[in-house]
Image: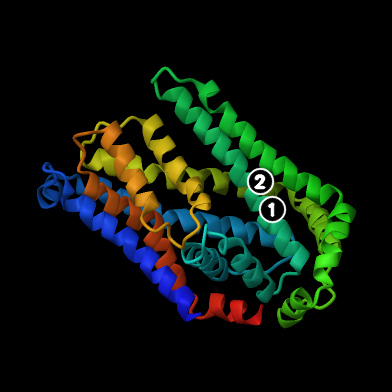
Amino acid sequence: MKARALLTGLSLAAGAGVCVAALWAGPGEQPWTALQEASWPLLALALAVAVAEPLLRAVRLRVFTRALDGRLSLWTSARITLVGDFAAAITPSRLGGEPARLCALIRAGLSSGAAGAVLLGEFLTDLCALIFLVIVALGLSGSGAGPQAVWPSVALLAGGGAAIGLALRWPSILDRLWTPLSSRRPTAWALRKAGLEGFSPGRWAAEVRGRSGVLLAGRWRGTAVGGICALLHTTARFAVLPLLTAAFAVPLDLRSAILIQMAIFYGLALVPTPGGSGVPEIAFAAALSLSAPSAPVGLLLILWRFLTFYLGGAAGGVVSPGLFYAEGRRA
């Protein structure tokens, strides 16, 4: 545990160091002057959008759980959403977010199958919202790159969704693959400690498939509201950088702002250290310097990274004390 905490601290410190270095690196960097000349209403709007993004995800989580006869309050849904952000922020490749939320949903009273169906519904609505938003943004950017420029990414995302769908469609195949693994003593011990004795991945996948059918087909009103929330929170997430650049009068087109954020948000899955160890900060500074050479890169980097990463992670650590670590100790 101490080694993990040290690695996480060093990784986050590396990211903070890159932010500070970028703030004073360029000869044109004058952060205090740029702040004085910035549009404070737009900065306040960027903060409001960053705060609204996890709240919209919490509303969607509550709607989906109620569609499966769950009774989560909006406050509990917000805590579960934020603890997922916290877990993702301190785990390698952001891998801890979904397991932490799955454990939190089960702890809140949902069955494991219902919790898995909720997470799958969130994934599918996020996928559709992301594809729609990127196609619209590229089509309206006026940069000469129409929607066809994003089709390779769309195909990759759709392929990942299809793979998950196939795994849920044939749970017996999944069961044959995982039964030898689950019968081993270390894995069985971990499941017993987590309170999941007798857990079968195949049976769980079958339950997730059945509950997902109820969620995505049988309760269409809840699914529609969840889809609207997904579109709104995805739009809010990608709107932070355009609002910041508008506040500082930086000439950055919408297409570049969307693609820069997309590359960093989803490229973090390839960085095997908690928080990215400065990689997202370096990528952001390099991309923004190329797209808008006159921009106050360091100041924009600090504000953008705070609003899209540190704010949610810190809030998750504050509002859900001990939840993630308690579930980790149980597993």
- Between marks 2 and 1, how big is the CA–CA gap? 6 Å
Residue 36 falls left or right of residue 63:
left
Colouring used for the render: rainbow
Residue 250 falls left or right of residue 151:
left
Q: Position of residue 119 (x, y in %)?
A: 66, 57
At label 1, the amino acid type is: Leu
**Disc 2 on helix, strand or loop?**
helix
Q: Which mark is residue 326?
A: none
Say whether residue 61 is visible.
yes
Location of the C terminus by quadrant is bottom right
Question: According to the image, label 2 marks what residue?
Answer: 124
Mark 2 crowd level (few <14, some 14–19, many ≥20, 10 Å Cα): some
Q: Position of residue 298 (x, y in %)?
A: 23, 49
Q: Position of residue 134 (x, y in %)?
A: 50, 33
Question: According to the image, label 1 marks what residue?
Answer: 120
| Residue toward you, 219 or 97 | 97
Q: Position of residue 45 (x, y in %)?
A: 31, 49
Say how many tags the image has. Answer: 2
Q: Residue at x 75, y 52 (%)?
A: 215
Residue 159 falls left or right of residue 47:
right
Say whether residue 217 is visible.
no
Q: Residue at x 31, y 40 (%)?
A: 286
| Residue toward you, 284 or 144 | 284
* Quadrant in which residue 292 is drawn: top left
Residue placed farthest to the top in the image? 144
Q: Are marks 2 and 1 in contact (CB under 8 Å)?
A: yes
Please tell me whether residue 268 is drawn above or below residue 65 in the rendered image: above
**Disc 1 on helix, strand or loop?**
helix
Please tell me whether residue 222 is drawn above or below residue 294 in the rendered image: below
At label 2, the amino acid type is: Leu
